[in-house]
Image (cartoon, rainbow, N blue to C red):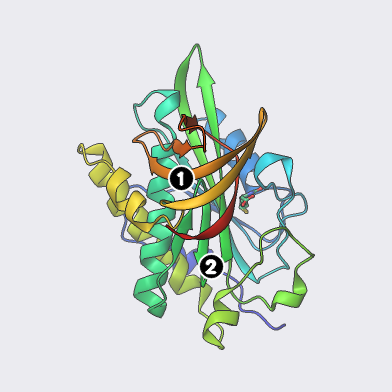
Amino acid sequence: MEWVPLDLGVIRRELETLRLGRAVELYDAIDSTNRRASEWARAGALDGAVVLAERQTAGKGRLGRRWFAPGGSSLLMSIVLRPDIQPLQAQRMTMICSLGAAQAIEQLTGLIAALKWPNDLLLSGKKLGGVLTELGVSGGRLTHVIVGMGLNINLALEQLPEVMSPPTSLLAELGRPVDRQVLLLSILSCVDGLYDRFLSGWSPHEAWRERLDTIGREVSVGDADGVVTGVAEDVDADGALLVRSSDGVVRRMLAGDVTLRGERL
Ligand code: BTN
């Protein structure tokens, strides 16, 4: 499929953010924008620095998986954030970035993107994108957070390999391609606004919770310790999912993979 490349000059000229994208790199091809953003963060990248790529040769997904995206089809970005918070609070940065992406998609297309715990963006119940958050910790302190987002934009679904969650793209949902550059600027501006509010004391928890389609549903959550099945009752401020299993015990899941087993209860 023909595609229009992102333009670094336009991005630099048109961004009106306080922090997001004030420093920005754009690669035609790179192994992984998250890998590059971590390297840049360790070398002193500014709060809000952004790494973009048209193509990744070793895009990383959650839980050791790969992330596939044909060149020019997607938005592939990693954001470096340096909030003064504890490592256990870092999921707040994921909340801010996924909310910002969902807001921008809604403003530009009118489509309402839901979120699936912990890190997926959904349209019509299918996976539009994923977020991979990685932490920089030194001496028990958080030095930086890398929030990597992969969003399927102008992508025909047959271009993707078989994956566990059924995927979708903005092209598939709208039936027309979307200007990736306009969407990118809008995402950076929405995330910038939310991050600025966060730094002034606002918590993203409630807005994130409201967009989650996971609450009140029967779920199976698999993590390193096994699978927990029950009803997803709530999420707490640190982003953990509270699952009540049939024995009545509520378990607090910090990470994992959710399978939605039924309709909202
Ligand atoms: C998931 O497994 O759902 C998370 C996928 C995250 C993919 C993005 S693409 C841009 C950034 N760079 C990476 O290597 N991964 C993230």
Q: Residue under circle 1?
A: 232
Front residue of 3/216: it is 216
Residue 235 location, x and y as percent? 39, 41
Residue 188 location, x and y as percent? 40, 58
Residue 71 shows in the view = yes
* Front label number (2 vs 1): 1
> Please, is residue 159 above or below residue 142 in the view?
below
Front residue of 142/173: it is 173
In which quarter of the view is residue 233 placed?
top left
Q: Amino acid at mark 1?
A: Ala
Residue 13 shows in the view = no
For marks 2 and 1, the one nearer the N-term is: 2
Q: Is residue 137 left or right of residue 172?
A: left
* Location of the N terminus (image quadrant): bottom right
Q: Residue at x 22, y 41 (%)?
A: 202
* Location of the C terminus (image quadrant): bottom left
Mark 1: which secondary structure?
strand
- Marks 2 and 1, how far apart in space? 17 Å
Mark 2: which secondary structure?
loop
Task: Identify the disc placed on residue 145.
Answer: none
Q: Residue furthest front?
A: 247
Does the closest atom of ligand 1 sit within 8 Å of the Cβ of label 2? no
> Please, is residue 169 above or below residue 190 in the view?
below
Residue 215 location, x and y as percent? 41, 51
Q: Is residue 153 left or right of residue 105?
A: right
Q: Residue under circle 2?
A: 125
Q: Residue at x 26, y 45 (%)?
A: 196
> Please, is residue 15 above or below residue 65 in the view?
below
Say few, some or many: other residues with alpha carbon within 10 Å of mark 2 (under 14 / 14 to 19 / 20 or more): some
Q: Amino acid at mark 2?
A: Gly
In which quarter of the view is residue 203 placed?
top left
> Please, is residue 181 above or below residue 54 in the view?
below
